[in-house]
Image (cartoon, rainbow, N blue to C red):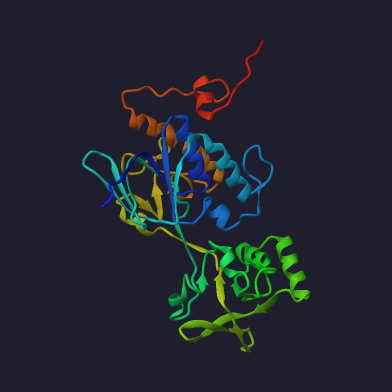
Amino acid sequence: MYSPTEADAVIIGAGPVGLFQVFELGLLDIKTHVIDSLPEIGGQCIELYPDKPIYDIPAIPVCTGRELTNNLLKQIEPFKPQFHLGQEVTQLEKQADGRLLISTSQNQSFLAKTVFIAAGVGAFQPRLLNLEGIDTFVGKQVFYHVKNPEQFEGKRVVICGGGDSALDWTLFFADKGASVTLIHRRDDFKAAPQSIAKMRELCASGKIELLIGQITSYETKENQLSDVIVTDIDGNSKQLGLDALLIFFGLSPKLGPIAEWGLDIDRKQIAVDTEKFQTSIPGIYAVGDINIYPGKKKLILSGFHEAALAAFAAAAYLNPDKQIQLQYTTTSPKLHRALGVTVPTSE
């Protein structure tokens, strides 16, 4: 049994607000560990709209979800946060000494002085293909995430979905798979226009195949998934051989274990005050879309504001006998050192 990792702060959620929470805590010299149920950093921005434009980030007229994530990662580099991805926080318990014991689905544990829940609308789980027995092949021939693209090269790849992830991987494998077939329930796609145009171009040239319909059954041979049956809106069916089935039906947010942590929950969101963004349990803060309070607006910029106030509240909680000074990154030598920047002196 491993001893839990001790931490000043654990952030649950690696979306934009969780990343900015790292920055605000870092300015106050509070080190962080970040846990996320998704396999990569970026939360909804990366999973749901990585290449779609965002227009309401202050001082940035337009950026994509991917660009926003990359910029936030660059911003927090000086603070060296430790990320723990692809695992869900399953348990959070207050200890006798006031610290918080956190357990994850990957059998990691943390003993934190403060916890920041920046979990968006909850832990994201992929929407599954609803066919009896298909889960037998998950991780072998059926995949909801692509972690190792090389394993699909030279294979007959079938991709399901109509969003950015489905289109992106269809285009990626077009020249790498033995065959690539995209299946979507209708001839209408919610993806970047350039991706849709490129997909149709590849269909016209015979590089890939597009089938409009849904997978209604499958066949096996020697304990392997060998074929799927695709049925269109008119009830016509087509049998399609494959080696790998990639499913991108989007993500379903679930409050999950958070509901069991003894927090004050209101309409599947965590109630907080608007001074500290603290929950009903001292030392636990909630920022971003996961929280609720009078006048709450679910905007990234609102989450950034909440993260700043939560960081100052946590600094006071961690150091009750110390006055927490408000310093500015434009003028504070201490913050310049923390950020690793050199400010030229005026002559």
The C terminus: image quadrant = top right
Image: 206 above or below 313: below
Residue at image point 61% right, 56% down: 49
Image: 334 above or below 274: above
Snapshot quadrant of residue 314? top left
Residue 267 on image: x %, y %: 41, 56
Residue 306 is at least partly visible in this image: no
Asked whether 253 or 19 is in front, the reply is: 19
The residue most toward the left is 96
Residue 37 is at least partly visible in this image: yes
Image: 114 above or below 207: above
Image: 229 above or below 120: below
The residue most toward the top is 347
Residue 213 on image: x %, y %: 62, 80
Asked whether 288 or 102 is in front, the reply is: 102
Residue at image point 51% right, 54% down: 40
Snapshot quadrant of residue 166? bottom right
Residue 190 on image: x %, y %: 65, 64
Residue at image point 48% right, 72% down: 140
Report the number of numbered marks: 0
Residue 157 on image: x %, y %: 61, 74
Residue at image point 61% right, 88% down: 235
